[in-house]
C-alpha cells in the first residue's frame, strides 16, 4: 500500500448536491479499488490559475489515501471520463520525509473538518486572541 494525495477540481456550475455526489463517487471508486481514505479536505470554490474549459473558478477537493498501485489507473480512468471534473492531479509519497509530510497533511485535513463543526467538538473552539491596542496618532491641522 502506497500513500497518495488526489487533488481534483469540479465545475463551479454544479449545485451543492451534485458536488457531494461527485465527492461520494470518488470515495466509492477509491474504496472499491482497495484504497483506505485517511481524510478529505474540501477547499471550496477558488479561482483557477488559468482558464480551464472556459471556467475561471472551480470547486477544489484533496483526498489523502493509501492504495495499491493498480488502483490509481482505475481512479484516473474514472476521472478522465467524468465531464464534471475539469482538472486533477495524483501525487505519490514514497520517502520517509514525504510520508511524514503526508501524515501531517492528512491529520491537518481531519482537524479542519472537525473545526468546521464546532457544535460536535466544543473543545475545538479557539480561545479569543488578545491583541495590543495602539492609540491612533492624532494630527492637528
Image (cartoon, rainbow, N blue to C red):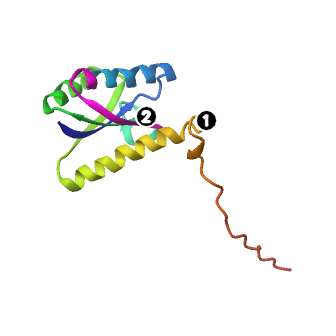
Q: Is residue 117 left or right of residue 19?
A: right
Q: Tell me: residue 108, above or below residue 71.
A: below
Label pair 2/1, CB-CB below 8 angstroms: no
Sequence-wise, the earlier of marks 2 and 1 is 2
Q: Tell me: residue 129, above or below residue 27.
A: below
Location of the C terminus (image quadrant): bottom right
How far is the residue under mark 2 from the one under mark 1?
A: 29 Å
Main secondary structure type of the part rendered in magenta? strand
Question: Within 10 angstroms of label 1, few (less than 14), some, or many (20 or more) residues?
Answer: few
The residue that appears at 19% across and 24% down in the rendered structure is 74
Q: Is residue 15 left or right of residue 93?
A: right
Per the rendered image, the range of residues in magenta is 30-45
> Which disc number belongs to residue 82?
none
Residue 140 placement: quadrant: bottom right
In this rendering, which labeled residue sits more in front, label 2 or label 1? 1
Q: Position of residue 76 (x, y in %)?
A: 22, 28
* Residue highlighted by disc 2: 58
Between 126 and 14, the one nearer to me in the picture: 126
Q: Tell me: residue 81, above or below residue 131.
A: above
Q: Is residue 32 magenta?
A: yes
Is disc 2 placed on a helix, strand or loop? strand
Q: Residue placed farthest to the left in the image?
A: 70
Q: Is residue 127 left or right of residue 105?
A: right
* Residue highlighted by disc 1: 119
The residue that appears at 39% across and 31% down in the rendered structure is 54
The residue that appears at 14% across and 33% down in the rendered structure is 69
Q: Position of residue 47 (x, y in %)?
A: 45, 41
Q: Position of residue 112 (x, y in %)?
A: 48, 43
Q: Count the numbered circles shown.
A: 2
Is disc 1 placed on a helix, strand or loop? loop
Amino acid at each position: 500500500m502506497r500513500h497518495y494525495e488526489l487533488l481534483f477540481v469540479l465545475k463551479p456550475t454544479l449545485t451543492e448536491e451534485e458536488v457531494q455526489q461527485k465527492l461520494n463517487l470518488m470515495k466509492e471508486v477509491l474504496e472499491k479499488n482497495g484504497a483506505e481514505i485517511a481524510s478529505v479536505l474540501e477547499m471550496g470554490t477558488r479561482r483557477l490559475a488559468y482558464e480551464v474549459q472556459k471556467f475561471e473558478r472551480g470547486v477544489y477537493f484533496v483526498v489523502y489515501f493509501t492504495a495499491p498501485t493498480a488502483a490509481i489507473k482505475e481512479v484516473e480512468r474514472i476521472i478522465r471520463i467524468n465531464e464534471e471534473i475539469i482538472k486533477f492531479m495524483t501525487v505519490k509519497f514514497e520517502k520517509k520525509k514525504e510520508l511524514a509530510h503526508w501524515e501531517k497533511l492528512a491529520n491537518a485535513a481531519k482537524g479542519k473538518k472537525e473545526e468546521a463543526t464546532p457544535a460536535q467538538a466544543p473543545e475545538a473552539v479557539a480561545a479569543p486572541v488578545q491583541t495590543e491596542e495602539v492609540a491612533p496618532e492624532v494630527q492637528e491641522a
